[in-house]
Amino acid sequence: MLNVLPFVAGLIAGAAAVSALRGERARSVLQDTGARLRTAYDEAQSGVRTAARSGFDLMRGLTSASAPAVEAEPAAPAKPVKPARKSVAKAASAKAAAAKPKATRAPRKAKPEQAEA
C-alpha cells in the first residue's frame, strides 16, 4: 500500500498542474515569461557577438602591428595525397587485432551425475 501512495500523489499533482495551466491567467503569464526570456536571450547573444568582434579586431590589430612586413611568396604546389590501398588498411587492422590477446574462459565445471531415484 505504501508503494502506491507516491504514484497516486504524483497523479493528483499532475492533474492539478494541467488544470491550472489550461487557464487564461496561466497562459498569459507563460507568454509574458517567454517574451522576456526571448528578449534576454537576444540581448545576451548580441553582447557576446560584440565582445567577440572587438576581441578579434584587437587580436588582428596586435598581430599586424607586431609582425614584420613580409612579401608573400608564391606557395609551392602541393602533391596530391594518394588514398591508402585497401590491402594496406586491412593488413594494419589485422596487425592491431593480432596484437590484442584473446580472452579465454575458465573451463566449465562438470555437472555431478544424478542418481536415479
Image: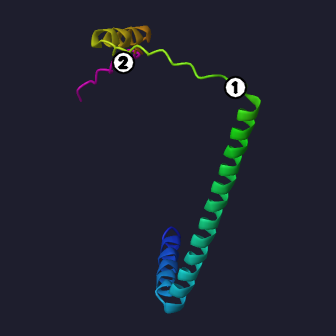
Disc ID at residue 15: none
Magenta region, main secondary structure = loop
Q: Position of residue 12 (x, y in %)?
A: 49, 81
Magenta segment range? 105-117
Q: Position of residue 30 (x, y in %)?
A: 54, 81
- Answer with the quarter of the image where residue 94 lies: top left
Q: What is the crowding at mark 1: few (fewer than 14 residues within 10 Å), some, or many (at least 20)?
A: few
Classify 10 Å Cα crowding around label 2: few (below 14), some (14-19), many (20 and above): few
Residue placed furthest toward the left: 116
Q: Secondary structure at mark 2?
A: loop
Residue 13 placed where, x, y %? 52, 79
- The extreme bottom residue here reads 24
* Quadrant of the snapshot with the C terminus: top left
Q: Amino acid at mark 1?
A: Ala
To which residue does mark 1 refer? 69
Residue 24 x, y percent position in the rendering: 49, 91
Residue depicted at 64% across the width and 66% down the height: 43
Outermost residue on the front side: it is 71
Asked if residue 108 lies in the magenta stretch, the reply is yes
Q: Is residue 74 left or right of residue 112?
A: right
Disc 1 element: loop
The residue that appears at 57% across and 71% down in the rendered structure is 38
Q: Name the N-terminal-most of marks 1 and 2.
A: 1
Of the pair 100 and 89, the residue shown nearer to us:
89
Q: Which residue is mark 2?
A: 108
Q: Quadrant of residue 63?
A: top right
Q: Residue at x 28, y 13 (%)?
A: 86
In the figure, is residue 73 to the left or right of 95? right
